Amino acid sequence: MRHLSILAFFIVIHQIASAQPHGTIVGKVTDSNSLPMSGVSIHCGETRIATLTDERGNFTLKMPEGNYRLAFSYVGFKQNEVMVEVSANTSTQIGIRLVASPSQMEEVVISTVKMQTTTVTPTRVQVLDVPQAISVMGQRMIRQQAAFDLTTLTRNVAGLTFTGNYSGAGSTQFFNARGFDLNETQNYRWNGMMVMNWGNHYADNIEQVEFLKGPASILIGDAAPGGVMNFVTKKPLADFSANLNLKTGSWKLLRPSLDITGPILRDRSLRYRLNTSLEKKDSFRDHVSSTIAFAAPAIAWDISSKLTLNLEAVFNNSKATDDAGLVSPDGTAKGLRTLPPSLYLGEPRRQYLYNNNHYFATLTYELTPLWRIKAMAFNGKTTNRPFGIWFDQPNTEGDFVRRGYGFYRNSANRSFSAEISGMFFTGKARHNVSLGLEYQSSSSRHTNGGELDSLDMANIFSPPGSRSTSLEPAESPLLPYQMIIKRKGIHLHDQVSLPGGRVFVYGGLRLGSTSQGNRYLPKEVGGTEYEGLADDVTDKFMVIPRFGLIFKPADNYSIYSSFSKGFEVNSPDIFAKNYLEYSSPPATTSDQLELGVKTSFMENRFGMTMAVFLINKKKPYGYVYLDPENPNFDEYNVYYQGHHRSQGIEFEMDGRLFPFLTTNGGLAIISTRVVNDPGYPSGNRLPNAPKFSFNYWINYEHPAFLKGFSASTGVFYQGNSYPGIDNDPNLLMPNAYTWDAAVGYQQRQIGVQLNLMNITNQISYLNPWQFNLFDVKPPRQMVITLNYKFGK
């Protein structure tokens, strides 16, 4: 709270200096098709005041009376300048039209710290004015790094760590942020709507990936405090264009994709977009392969000049060889060095299946140029089928037991949200406000709990090959209960810009309830081991506040401080051996204090963020294996006690340093510790949280010299970490780094790019399960991208 007091001092000083009469400029920016343009940069040269248009092309500026020259700019469009007269206590309305300019298409308007708005914040303000750290990975990074999976993209976010897979490619991916693991039922979002983390989320219809750092319960309800990952989808465009893309390379990669968009009606009020791809590849791991088929159609309809409807669908189907990774001969991370990274100990016939069908609808109505109503609905169905092998610890001769498991899991997920947001003035203070409500319901059922069955014996030095004849798991019957989550909430946000636009005060409040647990089905429970059990659904009501202060010594520089709270509702863990002891578990709570600085340079083409944070998490979910020497994932006890802490500093930069040079970089120094915990010693580090991580990427593309040629290179480093809270020194994951590079050439509509990943062929490992079972990270690989564009 000391930091809040410091910023409060600046408020008092600034208020004394702000007494000049003000007026308001209200406007809208459209293109040559009269369609609104979102994200247009607006600069006032006389005052250095700047803003962006919202998704409907609207903007508002409150300025001292006088005459001003406003400049409007956007990638691929000619800059437009107009003179505007501002009178005291009056509102001046203007309309601006920007004209496309092919010569401007190579220009990159930059990135996240900077001046770009984002969908993970409730009020329509610039990222520079948000009192919380936000990272955005957009199309520039996707193209330069030839990314077609989430792990490639997320390594560009300071403080975010990929910790492993559930059972190889195509399965659940695990992440840790600011020292805390993200959970699978709330920390992942598509267009702000919750999706289950049961498969690889990255897909071709993703425009950008946003990561809001720290507790976000005020926005979405219960969630782990590390942060929220939001996938923003591509929207239909007014002019026809198509992009054919083919990726090929190491391990028989073959990945054609198509992105096509354009108008359906001549007046462009009805538009479409289709993203589709097919990915097939083998692996550096013996006998491992995967296939992913994807399609995402979208329709945008301007029903009137004020009412817009967007409809989107996502169809994703994948299958991948189950791959539990390696088991160390001597039970240590160092022992992995005696094994070839390609060694496969599983069964190639066993596959992880994943299928999801998601449907989105977004209705936006513009009440006035300053106010809008937005409603979103989501319906999703997801099925996954883990079917894999688990390894026991080998003996001194290398012999070990292989255990099999397999089950089907189905989920239905429905969400609805509505919000009204806008702007009003009280005197000379501007309020950016948002009032929203939401409802989310999800249910899932399993065919079994994934129990392990002894399969056979194998030897780690003599790979077993394919010898299992076990039957695939049946799709029915399902267990006679549903795992349910129901969330309801209402949230209010107000960010007040005090006179002069140098000091902002943010306040937010959420009232919400969550019901979570197991509901038994009377028609199915009879005659089973669950007969006689009552529903064990936990109901929690939470009041979540959040506060923030922002001081802007200059228009491109802000200092902020914020305090936020979070919570996680814990379901009864029916698979735990002491399930009855915690049939009604308490909620896990968290709070964060964050202090940061954001700045942008070079007309907002380059930006930096530095954030210092402290997170406390209390009553966390914890578990201990019944047999620590040879643990099985289905034999454990749970508890909900203790206090865990994470604190650190993060730095990120992104943008264009020169007309021919763009860069992206970040570092994180994070200290985590167990303050107290009934299962583990105080002072232990939290799992999957490296103390130091670093990333840097630089790209060369000269607009004249060697026009069309590009070259990039980057380094990604991750410090050591423990996979478990017990801090077993034998399992300490060592430091690891990769060095990547790329060269490309674009000639008009045709482009080619070569990406080399992990050039020095570093072999490193991940451990998502806290004991002797390790994922192997990919060695050196190559990706060649061929690209053909037509249309605008």
Image (cartoon, helix red, strand yellow):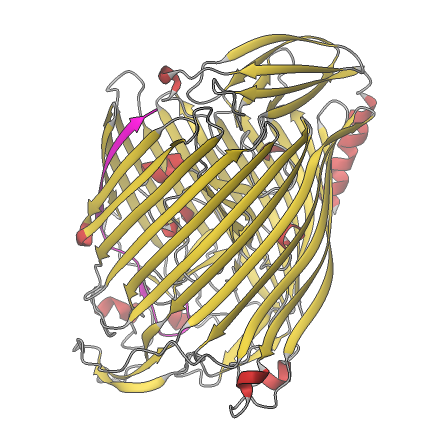
Relative placement, left or right, of 506 versus 362 is right
Q: Give the range drawn in magenta.
A: 768-792
Q: Position of residue 253 (x, y in %)?
A: 21, 51
On screen, residue 209 above or below 409: above
The residue sitting at 29% across, 63% down in the picture is 320
Residue 14 sits in quarter: top right
Residue 514, quarter of picture: bottom right
The outermost residue toward the front is 265
Left or right? Give the position of 461 relative to 166: left
Q: Position of residue 766 (x, y in %)?
A: 36, 63
Asked if one can make out residue 682 in the rendered structure from this viewpoint, the answer is: no
Residue 42 visible in the shown view: yes
Could you tell whether 472 is left or right of 373 in the image?
Answer: left
Q: Which of 785 and 58 is in front in this view?
A: 58
Q: Nearer the viewer, residue 175 or 763?
A: 175
Q: Is residue 641 positioned above or below 11 on the image?
A: below
* Residue 706 pos. (x, y %): 23, 20
- Residue located 52% across and 64% down the image: 686
**Above-or-below relation of 626 to 407:** below
Kindly identify the residue that appears in the image at 56 percent across and 20 percent down: 29
- What residue is at 37 percent from the left and 21 percent from the top? 105
Please state the horizontal and vertical placement of residue 575, each as a whole percent of the image. Answer: 51, 81
725 versus 248 height, above or below: below
Q: In which quarter of the image is the C terminus?
A: top left
Residue 786 colored magenta? yes
Closest to the observer, 61 or 616: 61
Residue 300 part of the magenta segment:
no
